[in-house]
Amino acid sequence: MEEKRLALESLIKLMEIMGAKHITTVRMKVMGILRQALRLKDRGFIELSCEAWDCFVRNIHLNCLGPMLSHIMVTLLPYLNQLPVKVAHIFNYLIVENR
C-alpha cells in the first residue's frame, strides 16, 4: 500500500510540473489511472486520490475539461459522503468557477 501511495503522490507532483500543456494531451490515460486509484478503499488513500483529482482538473485546458465533466462528476460523486469538503472543492472549481 505504501508503494501505491508513493506512486500517487509522485503522479500529483508530475502533473504539477508538467502543467496543462502536457497533461491535456494524456488526459484520458491519467483519468484512467486516477479511476483505478479510487478503487482502493483505505480512507487515507481515498483522500490522496481526491487530491490527485483536484490537481488533475486544475491542470487540464478548460476547453478539454468540458467534454470530460460528466465522467469526472460520476466518478467522484460516490465519494461525496466520505470526503464532502474535498469533493465539493473539486465540484466548485468545475461548475462554479469555470462555468
Image (cartoon, rainbow, N blue to C red):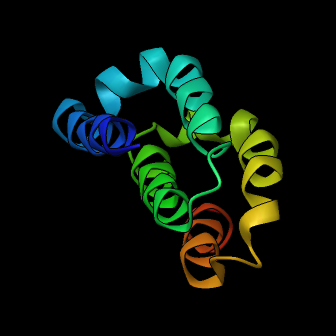
Task: Residue 69: name its quadrant.
Answer: top right
Relative placement, left or right, of 88 versus 45 is right
Residue at screen point 39% across, 37% down: 4
- Tally the marks: 0
Residue found at the very far front of the displayed protein:
1
Residue at 45% across / 44% down in the picture?
56
Reply above or below: 61 against 57. Answer: above
Quarter of the image where the N terminus is located:
top left
Question: Which residue lies at the image location 32% right of the left edge and 44% below the top edge?
Answer: 2
Q: Where residue 91 sits in the image (x, y, percent)?
A: 65, 68
Q: Is residue 84 left or right of residue 85?
A: right
Residue 5 horizontal side relative to residue 90, left or right = left
The answer to which image quadrant residue 90 occupies is: bottom right
Residue at the left extreme of this rendering: 17
Give how far across and how far down residue 25 sits, in percent: 44, 15
Give the residue furthest to the bottom. Answer: 85
Q: Quadrant of the C terminus?
A: bottom right
Q: Nearer the viewer, residue 43 or 93?
A: 43
The vertical placement of 11 against 41, above or below, is: above
Residue at horizontal 16 percent and vertical 36 percent from the top: 17
